[in-house]
């Protein structure tokens, strides 16, 4: 794909000129000039409400950003994704996480084959297995029902399941234990299993490739742990291990019966896979019906993204606003601040989705970009963050656009606590937008020398995303909102949001060093002097008892 330079396009130049004109304007002025702004710059879709009025934009900005989207082919690329075209150009793959939540009967073709029936076949198998396990019909090797599920995976094969389990804990089986092991640090596995009985434990090994070092290492540790408790009988593996993978050969080699394997496809990227069989642990926790509700939430947002007009299209608006701050204001990060304790892993999940997707330095044509791409996403649940890093957002020297996420009702109502939570969300966005002027600070009787310290300049932009309740449906819609916002940004930058060559490199790197740490013979080291010294130091320590 040949890429006309982004920065020299008329749409970009128009935005740059507009930015020059708008940059001195404050949110206070924008709100004063338009009494309806807070109800005008809002949009709704798939059960989510987006208030984007507290952004440093006016109608002209939005128009110009939409023109940019049009000129950069965002809509054509979106349609190509939904059609099953191979838009992951560096891996020559379709990008069809949207097919994972397509309703039965919809048709989406990859290489001439409708993939929707296969998706539902796997979902049905997952549901049948979940029902069996949750009802106690599926028994462990010694005949006991399964009460503990440990999902082993890493990156895209872990972050989604962990996040979804935490987010939907309210809907989960409370008489079962669900844990997640990802790190090759043995502590992760040991802590996850120390109080469990292997007779009642099922391992779900999640790996698209089934070759990932961390996951395979932990899977072997799990097998040893299991067999040690179950009398060393290899046939126990069939009752205590299932696999989620695209690689049947490796699954078989590991010793898992492929009858206990749940497949997915190369057109599902790791970070886009929580709604594929990678979400088996989610389904085991919340049950097939809730899982399907979650898929319906994803699908509702897909349809919204596909068919809503640009000015009311939530993911498109969020993606364009992100471009506005990242590329024109020079903002380097975005804070994601869920006012929901259940979403405590949501920022970590989003870090992978956003940064692995759009952390790219060349265009699809292989040219070095001359504009900043993917911003850094980070965050913590509110109100906790208010007592730590919000200081920098309010009064620091950096511009940090924030996404505030909240729910109208609590799943755990307790006195007026939910009101306090939401009051904080609302008040923070107000304070960030409008700050506290010197006059306001003085009116509080503040001595003059203290006034500059207490002034908050405001003008800090925020998106506010609200849903009625945290449900499987709203979680699905929320994740899809970010997926498509990431897509929009990547499409504007003309980068491949669906490859991850840097991650692939990481997978290779340690392989060379491992034998150099472990070999009995002193290895011949030809790294740089720092790496050589570190390896030697570790080898010495390794021989010394701790
Ligand atoms: C996701 C990435 C990466 C991947 C893990 C695990 O988009 O490719 O995070 O999910 O490296 O890979 P496997 O599922 O193949 O073990």
Image: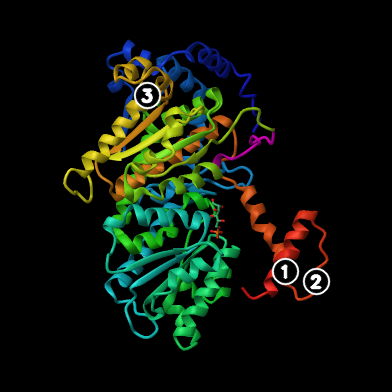
**Residue at horizontal 40%, vertical 23%?**
456
**Stretch of the chain drawn in magenta:** 357-367
Q: Residues within 10 Å of mark 2 (few under 14, many from 20)?
A: few
State the residue position of label 2.
Answer: 522
Res 79 visible: no
Q: Determine the CA span between mark 2 and mark 1.
A: 9 Å
Q: Tag on residue 433?
A: 3
Q: Determine the CA span between mark 2 and mark 3.
A: 61 Å
Q: With 25 as the anchor, is 361 left or right in this view?
A: right
- 354 above or below 186? above
**Residue at horizontal 27%, vertical 57%?**
171
Q: Tag on residue 539?
A: 1
Q: Residues within 10 Å of mark 3 (few under 14, many from 20)?
A: many
Q: Of residues 433 and 454, which is closer to you in this image?
A: 454
When asked about the image quadrant of residue 494, the answer is top right
| Disc on the earlier residue, 2 or 1 | 2
Helix, strand or loop at mark 1: helix
Work out which quarter of the rendered image holds the N terminus and state it.
top right
């Amino acid at each position: 794909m040949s890429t006309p330079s982004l920065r020299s396009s008329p749409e970009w130049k128009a935005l740059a000129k507009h930015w020059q004109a708008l940059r001195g304007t404050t949110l206070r002025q924008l709100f004063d000039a338009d009494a309806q702004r807070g109800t005008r710059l809002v949009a709704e879709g798939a059960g989510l409400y987006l208030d984007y009025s507290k952004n440093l934009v006016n109608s002209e900005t939005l128009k110009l950003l939409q023109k940019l989207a049009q000129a950069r082919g965002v809509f054509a690329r979106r349609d190509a994704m939904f059609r099953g075209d191979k838009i992951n150009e560096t891996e020559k793959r379709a990008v069809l996480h949207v097919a994972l939540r397509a309703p039965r009967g919809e048709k989406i073709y990859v290489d001439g084959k409708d993939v929707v029936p296969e998706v539902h076949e796997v979902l049905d198998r997952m549901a049948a297995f979940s029902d069996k396990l949750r009802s106690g019909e599926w028994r462990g090797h010694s005949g006991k029902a399964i009460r503990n599920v440990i999902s082993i995976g890493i990156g895209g094969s872990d972050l989604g399941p962990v996040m979804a389990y935490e987010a939907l804990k309210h809907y989960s089986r409370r008489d079962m234990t669900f844990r997640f092991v990802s790190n090759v640090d043995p502590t992760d596995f040991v802590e996850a299993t120390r109080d469990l009985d292997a007779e009642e434990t099922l391992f779900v090994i999640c790996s698209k490739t089934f070759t990932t070092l961390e996951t395979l290492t932990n899977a072997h540790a799990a097998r040893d742990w299991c067999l040690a408790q179950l009398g060393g009988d290899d046939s126990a593996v069939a009752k205590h291990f299932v696999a989620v993978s695209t690689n049947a050969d490796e699954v078989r080699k590991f010793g898992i019966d492929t009858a206990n394997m749940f497949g997915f496809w190369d057109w599902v990227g790791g970070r886009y896979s929580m709604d594929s069989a990678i979400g088996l642990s989610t389904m085991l926790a919340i049950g097939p019906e809730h899982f399907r509700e979650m898929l319906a939430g994803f699908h509702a947002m897909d349809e919204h993204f596909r068919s809503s007009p640009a000015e009311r299209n939530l993911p498109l608006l969020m993606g364009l606003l992100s471009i506005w701050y990242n590329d024109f204001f020079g903002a380097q990060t975005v804070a994601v601040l869920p006012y929901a304790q259940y979403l405590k892993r949501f920022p970590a999940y989003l870090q992978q989705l956003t940064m692995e997707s759009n952390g790219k330095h060349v265009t699809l044509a292989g040219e070095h970009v001359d504009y900043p791409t993917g911003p850094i996403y980070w965050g913590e649940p509110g109100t906790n963050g208010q007592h730590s890093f919000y200081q920098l957002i309010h009064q620091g020297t950096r511009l940090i656009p924030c996404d505030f996420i909240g729910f109208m009702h609590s799943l755990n109502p307790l006195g007026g606590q939910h009101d306090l939570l939401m009051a904080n969300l609302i008040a923070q966005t107000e304070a960030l937008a409008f700050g506290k002027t010197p006059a306001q600070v003085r009116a509080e009787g503040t001595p003059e020398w203290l006034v500059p310290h207490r002034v908050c300049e405001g003008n800090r932009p925020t998106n506010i995303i609200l849903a009625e309740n945290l449900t499987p449906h709203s979680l699905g819609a929320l994740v899809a909102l970010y997926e498509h916002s990431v897509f929009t940004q990547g499409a504007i930058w003309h980068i491949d949001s669906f490859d991850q060559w840097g991650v692939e490199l990481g997978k290779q790197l340690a392989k060379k060093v491992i034998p150099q740490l472990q070999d009995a013979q002193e290895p011949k080291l030809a790294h740089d002097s720092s790496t050589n010294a570190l390896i030697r130091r570790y080898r010495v320590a390794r021989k010394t008892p701790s």
